[in-house]
Image (cartoon, grey):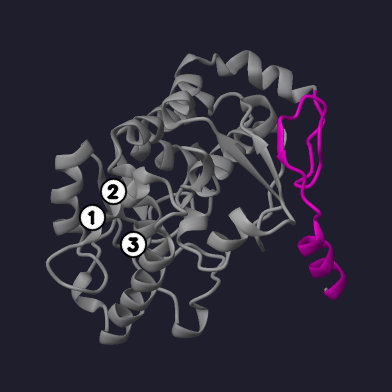
Amino acid sequence: MAEHVLESPPEGAAADWTIPQDWAAYTAEDHETWDILFARQSKQLPGRAAEAFLRGLDVLRLSKPGIPNYDELNERLMRATGWQVVAVPGLVPDDVFFDHLANRRFVAGNFIRRRDQLDYLQEPDVFHDVFGHVPMLADPVFGDYMQAYGQGGLRSLGFGSLDKLARLYWYTVEFGLVREGDGIKLFGSGIVSSHGESLFALDDPSPNRIRFDLERVMRTRYRIDDYQQVYFVIDSFEDLLRQTIETDFAPLYEKLADLPDLGPADLAPGDDLLTRGTQAYATERAGAA
């Protein structure tokens, strides 16, 4: 989710904070970096990522290698689900972010990480935003969920609970897992775009893996500086969409205001715990700090 950083669009941006992608400005090294990342993740994810994500990857297989040109990409994405990608100069205000989602526009940065940042980058770049998000936007059900989230975000602005709503986005859109067949698969953009976390999220004994519960998710803090200590597992994209549409969030926000937050590693009564994590990774990292 976005954060307030400026009161008005910066110079060169439109009133809705969009800017030209300026595809011609990418260097040969920029395109090569994309190709390295794309090849690595495309090879790693079959059997690990949700079928919806793997199907959506075809939207990114454009007429030329390198960073996708948003104009060409949007022709394919619009035909699939009516979504489009728009470039922005960085973080945008919450109301702008929600309005774009509510109108089936996904905001994306237009810079790409350096070659020495292939394995980890805290700030989302074009690879995270496009490779991580766009394949799922090509799925009709998930596309509807993203639009519903944006519409709900606009309604939530008067409740003072954006931190709670941000957790829903974080633990689904960015770091969500889904039951599929007889196993669990990846779909969150922060996982599928990360070589390390796409292994860690499924295979490592460290994190807790808990069945998705809307209230539980919105009580749970998250970490932005490393791999997650908990992942929430949805039953299906249809169920995620249903819960989002059918839930009256106003009384939920009121209830959450009276409940204490839960830490990323906490367990709570009523958790449907699929994997009890050792938290060894987080403990080791904290000890080395």
Q: Of label 3 and label 1, which has the lower sequence position? A: 3
Q: Are marks 3 and 2 in contact (CB under 8 Å)?
A: no
State yes or no: residue 282 in magenta: yes
Q: Which residue is mark 2?
A: 55
Quarter of the figure with residue 44: bottom left
SS of the residue at dot 1? Answer: helix
Q: Are marks 2 and 1 in contact (CB under 8 Å)?
A: yes
Q: Which residue is mark 1?
A: 58
Q: Residues under labels 2 and 1: Cα distance?
A: 6 Å
Q: In front here: 277 or 213?
A: 277
**Crowd rating for badge 3 (residues with CA inside 10 Å; few <14, some 14–19, many 20+):** few
Looking at the rendering, the stretch of residues picked out in magenta corresponds to 259-288
**Going by the image, does 87 lie left or right of 218?**
left
| Residue 2 showing in the rendered view | no
**Going by the image, does 85 lie left or right of 273?**
left
Q: Which residue is mark 3?
A: 11
